[in-house]
């Protein structure tokens, strides 16, 4: 009897659905919608994707939150039902999703769940470098001191809870070295630092930041700990045969400190044709430098070019003997060693950021400075105990040595303290499991500074926290406005956007040199800078986030402009450039950086590009591929075919079709751009076919249609960007319980024209950011 009863029930429900389709979805008519569009695949018998929709929405949602949010995500993105299946009208979609969202948000109001970050989270390498800069006023290269951090959920500030013995040793060594550097003290021997130039950097043109009239070389910041003499030694680029490249005449090589010439050399071809051992042996000299962080430049004076340097060349690259011979000598590395002859018996009072108003380091001033350092380094928490611990190290070392010895020991102790290395959020006594509690002002200050600056709070932010202005909405908003205007907010472009948009991956990308001989480090850096500057422009000028998707301007230098085929842009300086439609450039989807990191070394990849859009712009990534599905290269498909035809054969595998039917149509929109982002009209001797479709079946041709599809549903991009920012801000993955807060942020931003600051302000004011769940007992 069970089977006939189910058939009769389904017929009744189907009849009601046909009646309902002619009008708006009736109030609470959930069963009609589900039976009509969902239960064929998501009943208890099949439950595709792990989703069983045979439930009643009148029941409690406590155990259904995750599944319900998946349903909202799929329906809101028009991902379900799949194209080709019986689908709702746009009005039905809107009404049903609206009712579902309304119910979920109402449930969240009664049952708040702001989520829980780990109690201890170690600073990332990038955060550590910024924290040292802001605490001690010195520049360090954390990549040479600490190992890289592992990523999770797209960001490296999540899986940072451990501190292994080996890593602790690295932190101790780093603290000792940094303490000496901050105080301008020598170790047993002068310190040495080598800056190396990547071998695929073309050095035939001017380097931004160096004086006009110079060519090639390198510019970097170096911390000179004391007044004294420093040895600068330079090595030139060599080919695989150990010959210095590009030697055809005499060249003047200059060493500059803060723009002034400190010393210079002449570089000449060897007297004996093949004897290159002595060409750069004399490029070493001692120079006098005042203590402080200085800009050091090493560059060639640009003289009258030789005929061979002015001949038309087919490529912009000129960096390697075996691909594009250099037109002149180039700098390989610069080593700075010192100081020599400096007075090491007392500290040079040049680090005013560290010493403040003190005119000398005395026992009295040392105590005052250490107290201030502990306050900032520990983010205003555990400061009395931290100060007492630092003073114990100070007294022990000062008794057997000097004030400087004591101060160095105390500073090292501060830098290896868990209160400095870790972001600590302990459950407060008395908090009940399952009942969220509000963070205090100091905890908010720490979250805020690491979110916007990737660093520790400054003294002004700590002062606002101690005055309890951060738990006041107006006070919190005022600090956010101030911090976004600070130069340190550039960390959002470097660190957040660098990970969200995969810009960090550019460093490991090496396109096939036979197919793309013009690709070099100059172009790689220019690509990344363009994207960072667009993001930073939207942030600094508080523009709509939709300008990341569609814009009539971009940021170019000569190298990148030539790559894009945009004329009349000269020099290495980046500048804002107005675009015309024929340029084919604009938002993120047309940036060389994005197009390159979503390609293979020898071809484009609609799969990678489509997946990138779904993951980073729409927030609906497909599931991972089954382990038994072969890669495209492993399939017996003619490699001379256009990639669209190769993928068509690839999708013959039933295990591929489900995901590729969504990814590939989006990825095909990029096909007018090759694997390094240059425009093309043909592929494999055939005209490019860039027709594609959105998940809802809307068809388009090229990126114009894809961009319009994204901009016409701004709430989807706003939701995805909000989730990425929230993940980055909280240091944990976004969960289903965060969805109501995300929707609230998106609605708030929409009222303010989706301006960047409106999203940041709403995130900082949200429950997940300002509250925390206690640990389950």
Image (cartoon, grey):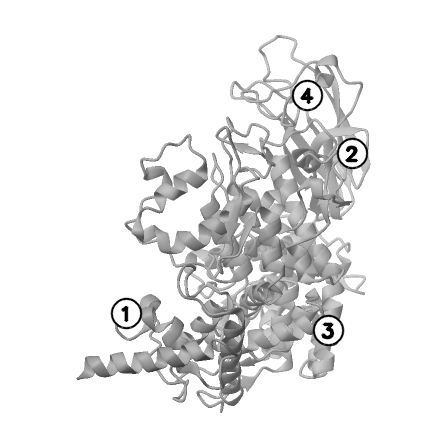
Q: Marks 2 and 1: in contact by CB < 8 Å?
A: no
Earlier in the chain: of badge 4 and badge 3, it is 4
Q: Position of residue 173 (x, y in %)?
A: 53, 54
Q: Find the distance from the CA under tag 2 to the CA under tag 3.
A: 42 Å
Q: Marks 3 and 1: in contact by CB < 8 Å?
A: no
Vertical comparison of 243 with 259: above or below:
above
- Quadrant of the image containing the N terminus: bottom left
Q: Nearer the viewer, mark 2 or mark 3?
A: 2
Q: Position of residue 95 (x, y in %)?
A: 53, 77
Earlier in the chain: of badge 1 and badge 3, it is 1
Earlier in the chain: of badge 1 and badge 4, it is 1
Q: Find the distance from the CA under tag 1 to the CA under tag 3.
A: 52 Å
From this viewpoint, is residue 496 visible? no
Q: Which residue was labeled with disc 3?
A: 479
Under circle 4, the secondary element is loop
Q: Which residue was labeled with disc 4?
A: 328
Q: Find the distance from the CA under tag 4 to the CA under tag 3.
A: 51 Å
Q: Which residue was labeled with disc 1?
A: 46
Q: Which residue was labeled with disc 2?
A: 568
Q: Find the distance from the CA under tag 1 to the CA under tag 4.
A: 69 Å
Under circle 3, the secondary element is helix
Res. 62 image quadrant: bottom left
Q: Nearer the viewer, mark 1 or mark 4?
A: 1
Under circle 1, the secondary element is loop
Mark 1 surroundings within 10 Å by alpha-carbon count, few (fewer than 14), some (14 through 19), many (20 or more) = few
Vertical comparison of 421 with 687: above or below:
below
Mark 4 surroundings within 10 Å by alpha-carbon count, few (fewer than 14), some (14 through 19), many (20 or more) = many
């Amino acid at each position: 009897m069970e089977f006939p009863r189910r058939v009769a029930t389904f017929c009744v429900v189907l009849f009601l659905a046909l009646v309902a389709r002619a009008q708006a979805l009736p109030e609470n008519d959930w069963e009609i919608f589900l039976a009509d569009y969902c239960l064929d695949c998501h009943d208890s018998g099949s439950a595709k994707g792990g989703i069983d929709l045979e439930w009643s929405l009148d029941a409690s949602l406590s155990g259904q939150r995750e599944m319900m949010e998946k349903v909202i995500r799929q329906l809101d993105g028009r991902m379900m039902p799949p194209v080709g299946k019986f689908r709702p009208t746009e009005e039905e979609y809107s009404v049903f999703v609206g009712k579902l969202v309304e119910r979920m948000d109402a449930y969240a109001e009664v049952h708040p769940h702001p989520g829980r970050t780990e109690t201890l989270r170690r600073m990332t390498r990038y955060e550590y470098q910024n924290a040292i800069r802001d605490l001690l006023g010195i520049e360090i290269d954390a990549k040479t001191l600490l190992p890289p951090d592992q990523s999770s959920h797209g960001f490296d500030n999540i899986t940072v809870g451990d501190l292994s013995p080996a890593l602790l040793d690295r932190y101790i060594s780093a603290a000792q070295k940094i303490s000496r550097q901050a105080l301008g003290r020598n170790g047993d021997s002068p310190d040495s630092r080598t800056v190396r130039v990547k071998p695929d950097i073309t050095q035939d043109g001017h380097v931004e930041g160096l004086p006009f009239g110079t060519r090639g070389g390198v510019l970097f910041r170096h911390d000179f700990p004391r007044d004294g003499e420093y040895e600068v030694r330079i090595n030139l680029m060599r080919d695989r045969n150990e010959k210095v490249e590009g030697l055809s005449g005499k060249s003047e090589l200059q060493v500059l400190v803060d723009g002034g010439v400190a010393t210079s050399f002449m570089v000449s071809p060897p007297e004996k044709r093949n004897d290159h051992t002595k060409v750069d042996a004399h490029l070493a000299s001692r120079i006098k430098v005042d203590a402080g962080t200085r800009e050091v430049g090493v560059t060639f004076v640009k003289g009258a070019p030789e005929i061979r340097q002015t001949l038309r060349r087919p490529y912009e690259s000129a960096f390697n003997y075996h691909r594009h011979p250099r037109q002149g000598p180039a700098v390989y590395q610069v080593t700075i060693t010192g100081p020599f002859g400096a007075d090491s018996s007392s500290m040079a009072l040049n680090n005013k950021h560290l010493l403040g108003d003190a005119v000398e380091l005395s026992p009295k001033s040392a105590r005052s400075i250490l107290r201030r350092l502990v306050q900032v380094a520990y983010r205003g928490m555990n400061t009395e105990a931290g100060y007492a611990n630092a003073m114990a190290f100070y007294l022990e070392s000062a008794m057997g040595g000097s004030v400087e010895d004591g101060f160095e020991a105390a500073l090292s102790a501060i830098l290896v303290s868990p209160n400095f290395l870790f972001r600590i959020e302990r459950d407060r006594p008395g908090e009940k499991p399952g009942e969220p509690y509000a963070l205090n002002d100091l905890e908010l200050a720490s979250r805020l500074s690491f979110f916007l600056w990737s660093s520790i709070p400054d003294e002004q932010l700590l002062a606002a926290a101690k005055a309890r202005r951060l738990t006041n909405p107006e006070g919190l908003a005022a600090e956010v406005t101030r911090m976004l205007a600070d130069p340190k907010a550039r960390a959002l472009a470097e660190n957040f956007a660098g990970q969200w948009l995969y810009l960090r991956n550019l460093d490991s990308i090496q396109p096939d040199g036979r197919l793309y001989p013009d690709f070099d480090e100059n172009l790689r850096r220019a690509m990344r800078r363009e994207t960072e500057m667009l993001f930073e422009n939207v942030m600094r000028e508080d523009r709509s986030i939709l300008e990341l998707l569609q814009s009539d301007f971009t940021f170019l230098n000569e190298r990148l402009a030539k790559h894009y085929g945009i004329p009349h842009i000269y020099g290495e300086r980046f500048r804002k450039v107005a675009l015309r439609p024929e340029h084919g450039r604009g938002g993120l989807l047309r940036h060389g950086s994005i197009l390159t990191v979503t390609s293979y070394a020898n071809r484009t990849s609609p799969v990678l590009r489509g997946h990138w859009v779904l993951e980073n712009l729409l927030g609906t990534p497909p599931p991972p591929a089954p382990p038994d599905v072969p890669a495209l290269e492993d399939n017996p498909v003619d490699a001379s075919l256009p990639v669209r035809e190769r993928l068509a054969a690839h999708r013959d595998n039933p295990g591929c079709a489900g995901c590729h039917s969504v990814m590939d149509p989006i990825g095909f929109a990029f096909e007018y751009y090759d694997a390094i982002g240059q425009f093309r009209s043909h592929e494999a001797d055939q005209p490019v076919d860039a027709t594609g479709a959105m998940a809802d079946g809307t068809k388009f041709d090229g990126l114009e249609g894809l961009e319009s599809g994204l901009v016409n549903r701004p709430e989807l991009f706003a939701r995805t960007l909000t989730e990425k920012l929230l993940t980055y801000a909280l240091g944990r993955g976004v969960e289903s319980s965060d969805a109501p807060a995300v929707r609230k942020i998106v609605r708030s931003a929409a009222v303010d024209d989706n301006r960047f600051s409106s999203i940041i302000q709403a995130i900082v004011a949200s429950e997940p950011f300002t509250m925390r769940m206690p640990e389950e007992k």
